[in-house]
Amino acid sequence: MTTLVVDNIALLVTNGDEGEGPMGVHRNASLVLDADAGTVLAVGRRGAAADERLDAAGRCVIPGFVDSHTHLVFAGDRSAEFAARMAGRPYAARGILETVEATRGASDAALRQAAAARRREGLRAGITHVEVKSGYALDVDGEARLCALAAELTDDATFLGAHVVAPGYEHRTDDYVDLVCGPMLAACRPFVRWIDVFCERGAFDAEQAKAVLAAGRDAGLGLRVHANQLGPGPGVRVAVEAGAASADHCTHLDGEDVAALAASDTVATFLPLTDFCTRQPYPDARKVIDAGATVALATNTNPGSSNTTAMSLALALAVRDMGMTVEEALVAATSGGARALRREDLGRLTPGARADAVLLDAPAPDHLVYRPGVPLVAATVVAGRVAWRDGPR
């Protein structure tokens, strides 16, 4: 067994039951990891012995960010659309079709290279685990290709053939839903753990979304829903009624939506970077948390509405504009993301958990919000091994 100790930690956040407060804080600590098994062995005092040592030098260590909503596999550039939106043009889901055209025309090698670069960027941002969706091909062979490429990046790949209605099916949405639920799902099923559907105006209505989710459930997949992004709608309640692991976006929630989330196991996953990039209003996370629902934060990395992996900025927006405390935001981006993926091994630094940790160039995690936009990640550890490091320490 090869062990790695992250030593000389001034403040260690574990998200465990032991330690101070709801984040399980330990001070003057060490974190001992099994680099072969990729798991946490122990939390102890400074000076623990191990085969390899990463000196935290009196800084802070937190669990790695669990990014439970991304679209990393795509081609093309929509910066002109972004500039137009900043000039006043409203966001519309149909812009997805521009990315579909570019992605269909890209080679496997080009898509793989671009997705890997985005994943490396995420490691520099402290993201140790990602969910990755398809959804930029919208035909049987293309979606299977994207799912296979997503599965090279994560064991939480998601089939999103029901992203928007494919070209050629503009006035035959039900026919396209049949394609998604039949041949497309069959082709993608070997590569994915999840199925997702965009239940929104301009995409799929409640009955169509329910059909997609039912087909995914019958195929043994977990359920996810893009819900209530562009306005009030049925998406959140569709997700809750189906037993989905998460309802994502949740920008426009009414009292019934909040009550439904609070009474369920469905995680409300907020994507504040998308609201920032589309000039949508920010959701009232305070209301959702106070009602008793579980919440997560994710980046929604994609070319049209959130072309960023800056999870720390998502935390800052959640605190500044959504009513969350720093502690709530950090938990939402770590163990909340794990809950949204129904993973017990992620989002915490306790014995037996996957050894995903982030060393911050800061004395405490509140600097992620206190110093917005500053790259504070000094090192990222994934499964017990240093995956990225900002120079020698």
Image (tube, grey):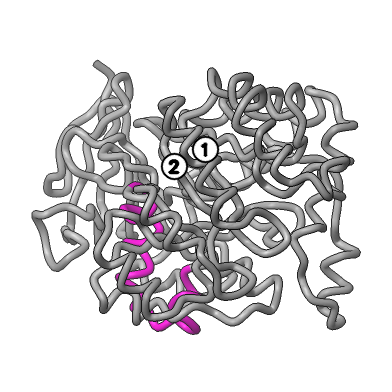
Q: Is label 1 in contact with label 2 (beta carbons under 8 Å)?
A: yes
Q: Is residue 375 above or below residue 111?
A: below
Q: Which residue is identified by label 2?
A: 223
Measured in 3D between alpha carbons, the distance from the residue under mark 1 to the one under mark 2, in whole angstroms, is 5 Å
Q: Residue at x 75, y 40 (%)?
A: 136
Quadrant containing the N terminus is top left
Kind of element beneath mark 1? strand
Q: Which residue is identified by label 1?
A: 195
Q: Position of residue 280 (x, y in %)?
A: 64, 78
First in sequence: mark 1 or mark 2?
1
Residue 358 visible from this viewpoint: no
Magenta span: predominant SS is helix
Q: Residue at x 36, y 61 (%)?
A: 332
Q: Residue at x 15, y 38 (%)?
A: 42
Q: What type is the residue that disc 2 sits on?
A: Leu
Q: Is residue 314 above or below residue 94?
A: below
Q: What type is the residue that disc 1 sits on?
A: Ile
View extreme (left): residue: 18
Question: Residue 273's image quarter?
Answer: bottom right
Residue 330 is labelled as: none
Q: Which residues are magenta?
A: 315-338
Q: Is residue 264 magenta?
A: no
Q: Position of residue 263 (x, y in %)?
A: 24, 64
> Is disc 2 surrounded by few (<14), some (14 to 19) or many (20+) residues within 10 Å?
many
Q: Position of residue 10 (x, y in %)?
A: 25, 60
Q: Is residue 350 left or right of residue 157?
A: left
Q: Residue at x 46, y 30 (%)?
A: 193
Q: Is residue 88 left or right of residue 272?
A: right
Q: Is residue 320 magenta?
A: yes
In this view, the residue in front, 6 or 248, is: 248
Question: Residue 112's image quarter?
Answer: top right
